[in-house]
Amino acid sequence: MARDTGAQCKQCRREGEKLYLKGARCFSDKCGVDRRSYPPGQHGLTRQKQSEYRLQLREKQKARRFYQILEKQFRTYYDTASRQQGVTGDNLLRLLERRFDNVLVRLGFAASRRQARQLIRHGHWTINGRRVDIPSFQVREGDVIAVSDKSSAKDIIKEATEMTAAVPAWLQADHDALTAQILRLPERGEIATPVQEQLIVELYSK
């Protein structure tokens, strides 16, 4: 399975804002963005020209890093979204939100998408009673998510739930029983992703 193994704090600094890639560390004094609020590298403190293409590219990179997926897979999501009915940008974010690893983070069952992906790959979660070990699995309306009876990671999952302030309205979570349900598909206003999706559409439309 291809994955991004780069330094995560540098990714946040590159985009100029917190992407919450490292769980509890992002809320502590060790956060890279709080400590050094400028891009990494020897030219990080220099002023850079803000062209239209640069703005579009940065939004695409921000979205890709936020959901922790590689370029080829992100382009596949965009191609799928462009073939669906409705607004392409909204369709794209909806597909990304429905990824199993992202849903676990939104539910509060994982502190970061990397942790969620690891828990999924190691078989700690089930959907509708069947074990699912594919982080990119697309959840659907009515799906029931539960921790496996044989899971040895329940304490880790419980710790993650303590960091959760709220669960999106399209999801329902029981943090005591470690179960959840997909009530419906998310609307754009319910997707708390810090990107302007229209700029991504403009970039790929060239």
Image (cartoon, rainbow, N blue to C red):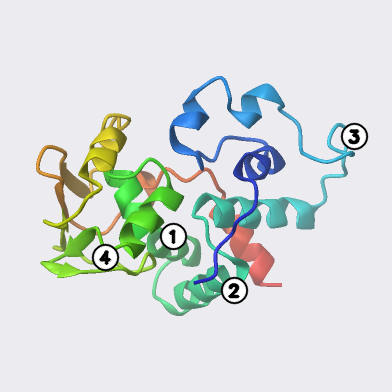
Q: What's the distance in space between the residues labelled 4 and 1, CA to CA?
A: 17 Å
Name the kind of residue labelled 4 in the image. Val
Secondary structure of the residue carrying tag 2 is helix
Q: How far across and how far down the image is residue 127, in percent? A: 18, 65
Task: Give the residue pinned by disc 4.
Answer: 139
Select label 1 or label 2 by which is in front. Answer: 2
- In the shown orientation, is residue 98 left or right of residue 3? left
| Mark 4 vs 3: CB contact within 8 A | no
Q: What's the distance in space between the residues labelled 4 and 2, CA to CA?
A: 21 Å
Q: What's the distance in space between the residues labelled 1 and 3, CA to CA?
A: 34 Å
Mark 1 surroundings: few (<14), some (14-19) or many (≥20) residues within 10 A: some
Secondary structure of the residue carrying tag 3 is loop
Q: Earlier in the sequence, mark 1 or mark 2?
A: 2
The quadrant in which residue 159 appears is top left
- In the shown orientation, is residue 135 left or right of residue 54? left
Q: What's the distance in space between the residues labelled 1 and 2, CA to CA?
A: 19 Å
Could you tell me which residue is drawn at 83 percent across and 36 percent down? 44
Q: Earlier in the sequence, mark 4 or mark 1?
A: 1
Task: Give the residue pinned by disc 3.
Answer: 46
Q: Earlier in the sequence, mark 4 or mark 2?
A: 2
Name the kind of residue labelled 2 in the image. Lys
